[in-house]
Image: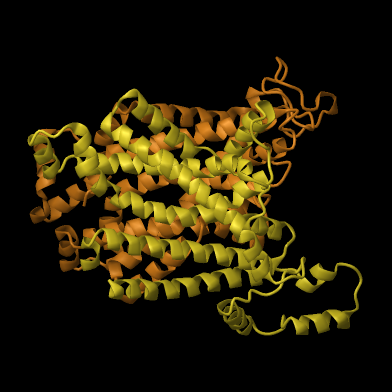
C-alpha cells in the first residue's frame, strides 16, 4: 500500500523518486513492502511461534462451543473443586464448573480486551499525534502537555479511577484502557510526523496545493504504518494484562464472566485446597502475552528498515 | 545546572496541576450521594441537606476543585467517608510500608538485573544469556497477581519457607519484593545488556583492547561506567513506578500500604481516600521522573546542552 502510494507520487512527480526507492527497484525487482516484511518476519523463529499461538487462540475463540461439551456458566455442585481428571482436564472450580471450558471461553474475552482498547487508543493517539506533529505551535503544545499529564499517572491507578467512575462493565474497560493508552501512541506518531513533514514529498505535495488533511492522511500516515503495527501488536499484551489486573482488583470484569483474571482471583481463595483453579488460567495469560510479545518483537525487527525516517 | 533543575521543576508544575484536575473531575462526577453512602439508613431530608452544606457538596464543581487544590497544597486531602479520619494521616501512616516494599523490590531488581545484564552482554548468545533473557521476558509477561499466588503456593504453602501474607518482619518482605521487582529486574538486565553491547562497539574500547588489556578490565574499567548511564536513569524512574505498582502486590500479600488503601477505598466507594491515594502516588511518580532527569543531567553533562 505504501509502495503503491509512493509509486503514484513518483509517476506524477518524477523528481520525488527518492534514492532508496530506486535502489530497491533495481536491486530486487519484485520487492514490495509486504513481501519484504513477511520474508524478514518469517526468518524470526520466536515470532513465527508467536503467530502460530495467536492463530490457535483465535481459532479457539471462534470454535470454542464445539471444542468442549460443558457450559462455562453451568453450576454442578456434585463436582466442586475437583482436581484434574479425564472428565475435567483442568479440574473444576468452586461451583463445579469445568475449568478448561471457562478458560477456553475466556480466550474470547482476552482477545477482545486485547484488541479493542488497543485499537481505540491507536486511533485516538494517531489522530492527535498527526494533528499535533503536523500543525505544530499551540495545538501541538496542548496535545503534548495532555500526553505528559496522562503519562504521569501510573497507568493501572488511572484505569482504576476511570473504572470506579464509570462502573465495572466490559465496555468501560475498553474506555478506561483507551483513555490510559492513547498518549504513548500520540507521542510516537508525533515524532514520526515531525521528521516526515520535512521530507521532500510532503513539501512537493504542499507546493502543488494538496490540502493539509489529504497530506496527513495520504502522504504522512502510510509512512507511520510500520511504527503503528509494532505499537499495536505490543499494545495487545499490555491491555490483556491490565484487564486481568483490573478484574483481579474487582474493578474489571464481574463474575460469572469467564475472564482469566477473574478466574485466578476466584482461585485465590482455594490456593491451599485447589491450586489448579488459580494456576491454570494464569498460564494461559502468560502464553498469550508471550505470543503477542514475540509477534511484536518480530514485527519490530522486520519493519526496522521502514521505521528509520 | 541550577538553571536546568529549575526549568525541569517549572515543567512539572503544570503537569501536577493537570493531574489534580483529571483526578478531581473523574472522581467528582461519579453518581451517588456521598452523604447517603456515609449514613446508609433512614435519615431525614434536612439532615442530608445540612451535612451536604457542611461538606460544601452543593457548591459548583470549579469552586470545590479550587478548595481541593488549596487543601492539597497545604497537605489537607479531606476526610475519609468511611473511616472518618484525615486522608493525609491515613496515607502517611501507610506510606512507610509501601516505601520499604518498593525499596526492597528495587534493590532486588538492581542486585539481580545489573550483574545478569553484564554477564549476558559479555557472554552473548550463551546459555546464561538466553536464560537471563528468558527470565526477563517472563517477568514482563506474567500477571503480577498470578506470580504472587504462584510464589505463595510454592514457598509458603508447599515448602513452608516463608509466611503467606502479612507484614510483621523481614521474612514478610522477601516474596512481595521479588514478585514486585521481577519485571524491573528483567528490564534492567535487558537495558544493561543492550547498553553495554553498544558501548563495546566504540573506538575507545577497541583502543583499550589494542593496547593489550584483558577483557575484564576493558569491561569494568572502560565500558561499564558509560553503559550504566541509561540504566541509572531507568532505575530512578522505576523506584517511583514500583511505589505505584505495589497496588497489586500489597493486596495479594496483605501489606497495609498506600496501594491497598486505594483498592479498599474503591471497594468501600470512599472517594476522598481514593482521590488522596491516587494523587499521592502520581505525585511520587512525577517527582521520581524529575529526579531521574536531574540525575541524568548530573551524570551526563551532554544533556544539559540540549
| Residue for point 25% across, 56% down | A219
Using the rendered image of the protein, determine whether residue A102 is visible from the camera's viewpoint.
yes
Q: Quadrant of residue A271?
A: top right
Q: Position of residue A134 (x, y in %)?
A: 28, 66
Q: Quadrant of residue A148?
A: bottom left
Would you say A105 lies left or right of A156 here? right
Vertical placement of residue B17 versus B106, above or below: below
Q: Quadrant of the N terminus of chain A?
A: top left
- Name the one closer to the observer, A236 or B264: B264
Q: Quadrant of residue A52?
A: top left
| Residue for point 34% across, 43% down | B191
Q: Position of residue B37 (x, y in %)?
A: 80, 68
- Name the one closer to the observer, A183 or B221: B221
| Residue for point 67% across, 41% down | A262
Q: Which chain is yellow?
A: B
Would you say A271 lies left or right of B234 here? right
Vertical placement of residue A262 versus B256, above or below: above
Total labels: the figure holds 0
Using the rendered image of the protein, determine whether residue A237 is visible from the camera's viewpoint.
no
The colour applied to the residues of chain A in this rendering is orange
Residue sitting at the far top = A86
- Name the one closer to the observer, B288 or B50: B288
Would you say A73 lies left or right of A218 here? right
Vertical placement of residue B19 versus B99, above or below: below
Q: Position of residue B124 (x, y in %)?
A: 28, 30
- What's the image's color scheme? by chain
Q: Position of residue B79 (x, y in %)?
A: 71, 73
- Name the one closer to the observer, A134 or B156: B156
Amino acid at each position: 500500500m505504501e509502495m503503491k502510494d509512493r509509486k503514484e507520487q513518483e509517476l506524477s512527480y518524477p523528481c520525488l523518486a527518492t534514492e532508496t526507492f530506486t535502489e530497491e527497484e533495481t536491486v530486487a525487482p519484485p520487492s514490495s513492502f509486504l513481501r519484504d516484511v513477511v520474508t524478514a518476519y518469517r526468518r524470526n523463529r520466536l515470532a513465527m511461534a508467536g503467530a502460530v499461538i495467536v492463530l490457535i487462540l483465535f481459532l479457539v475463540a471462534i470454535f470454542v462451543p464445539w471444542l468442549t461439551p460443558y457450559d462455562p456458566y453451568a453450576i454442578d455442585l456434585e463436582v466442586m473443586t475437583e482436581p484434574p481428571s479425564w472428565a475435567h482436564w483442568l479440574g473444576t472450580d468452586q461451583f463445579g464448573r469445568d475449568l478448561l471450558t471457562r478458560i477456553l471461553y475466556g480466550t474470547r474475552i482476552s482477545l477482545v480486551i486485547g484488541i479493542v482498547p488497543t485499537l481505540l487508543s491507536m486511533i485516538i493517539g494517531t489522530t492527535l499525534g498527526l494533528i499535533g506533529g503536523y500543525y505544530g505551535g499551540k495545538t501541538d503544545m496542548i496535545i503534548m502537555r495532555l500526553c505528559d499529564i496522562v503519562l504521569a499517572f501510573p497507568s493501572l491507578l488511572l484505569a482504576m479511577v476511570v473504572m470506579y467512575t464509570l462502573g465495572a462493565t466490559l465496555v468501560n474497560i475498553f474506555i478506561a484502557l483507551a483513555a490510559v493508552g492513547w498518549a504513548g501512541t500520540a507521542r510516537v506518531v508525533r515524532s514520526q510526523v515531525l521528521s516526515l513533514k520535512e521530507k521532500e514529498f510532503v513539501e512537493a505535495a504542499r507546493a502543488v496545493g494538496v490540502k493539509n488533511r489529504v497530506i496527513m492522511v495520504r502522504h504522512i500516515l502510510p509512512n507511520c504504518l510500520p511504527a503503528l503495527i509494532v505499537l499495536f501488536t505490543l499494545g495487545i499484551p499490555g491491555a490483556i494484562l491490565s484487564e486481568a489486573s483490573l478484574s483481579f482488583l474487582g474493578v474489571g470484569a464481574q463474575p460469572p464472566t469467564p475472564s482469566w483474571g477473574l478466574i485466578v482471583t476466584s482461585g485465590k481463595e482455594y490456593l491451599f485446597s485447589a491450586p489448579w483453579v488459580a494456576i491454570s488460567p494464569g498460564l494461559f495469560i502468560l502464553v498469550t502475552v508471550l505470543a503477542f510479545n514475540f509477534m511484536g518483537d518480530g514485527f519490530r525487527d522486520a519493519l526496522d528498515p521502514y521505521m528509520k525516517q | 545546572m541550577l538553571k536546568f533543575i529549575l526549568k525541569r521543576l517549572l515543567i512539572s508544575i503544570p503537569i501536577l496541576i493537570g493531574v489534580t484536575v483529571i483526578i478531581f473531575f473523574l472522581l467528582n462526577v461519579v453518581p451517588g450521594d456521598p452523604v447517603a453512602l456515609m449514613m446508609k439508613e433512614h435519615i431525614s431530608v434536612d439532615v442530608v441537606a445540612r451535612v451536604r452544606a457542611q461538606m460544601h457538596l452543593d457548591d459548583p464543581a470549579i469552586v470545590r476543585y479550587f478548595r481541593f487544590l488549596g487543601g492539597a497544597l497545604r497537605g489537607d486531602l479531606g476526610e475519609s467517608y468511611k473511616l472518618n479520619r484525615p486522608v493525609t494521616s491515613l496515607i502517611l501512616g501507610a506510606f512507610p510500608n509501601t516505601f520499604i516494599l518498593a525499596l526492597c523490590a528495587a534493590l532486588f531488581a538492581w542486585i539481580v538485573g545489573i550483574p545478569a545484564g553484564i554477564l549476558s552482554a559479555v557472554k552473548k548468545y550463551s546459555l546464561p544469556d538466553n536464560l537471563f533473557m528468558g527470565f526477563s521476558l517472563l517477568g514482563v509477561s506474567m500477571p503480577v497477581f498470578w506470580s504472587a499466588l504462584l510464589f505463595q503456593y510454592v514457598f509458603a504453602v508447599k515448602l513452608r519457607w516463608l509466611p503467606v501474607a502479612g507484614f510483621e518482619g523481614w521474612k514478610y518482605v522477601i516474596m512481595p519484593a521479588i514478585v514486585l521487582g521481577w519485571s524491573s529486574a528483567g528490564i534492567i538486565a535487558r537495558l544493561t545488556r543492550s547498553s553495554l553491547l553498544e558501548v563495546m562497539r566504540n573506538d575507545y574500547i577497541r583502543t583499550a583492547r589494542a593496547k593489550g588489556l584483558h577483557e575484564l578490565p576493558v569491561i569494568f574499567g572502560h565500558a561499564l561506567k558509560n553503559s550504566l548511564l541509561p540504566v541509572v536513569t531507568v532505575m530512578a524512574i522505576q523506584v517511583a513506578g514500583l511505589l505505584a505498582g505495589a497496588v497489586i502486590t500489597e493486596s495479594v500479600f496483605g501489606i497495609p500500604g498506600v496501594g491497598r488503601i486505594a483498592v479498599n477505598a474503591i471497594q468501600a466507594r470512599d472517594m476522598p481516600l481514593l482521590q488522596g491515594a491516587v494523587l499521592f502516588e502520581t505525585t511520587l511518580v512525577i517527582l521520581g521522573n524529575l529526579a531521574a532527569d536531574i540525575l541524568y543531567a548530573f551524570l551526563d553533562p551532554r544533556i544539559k546542552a540540549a
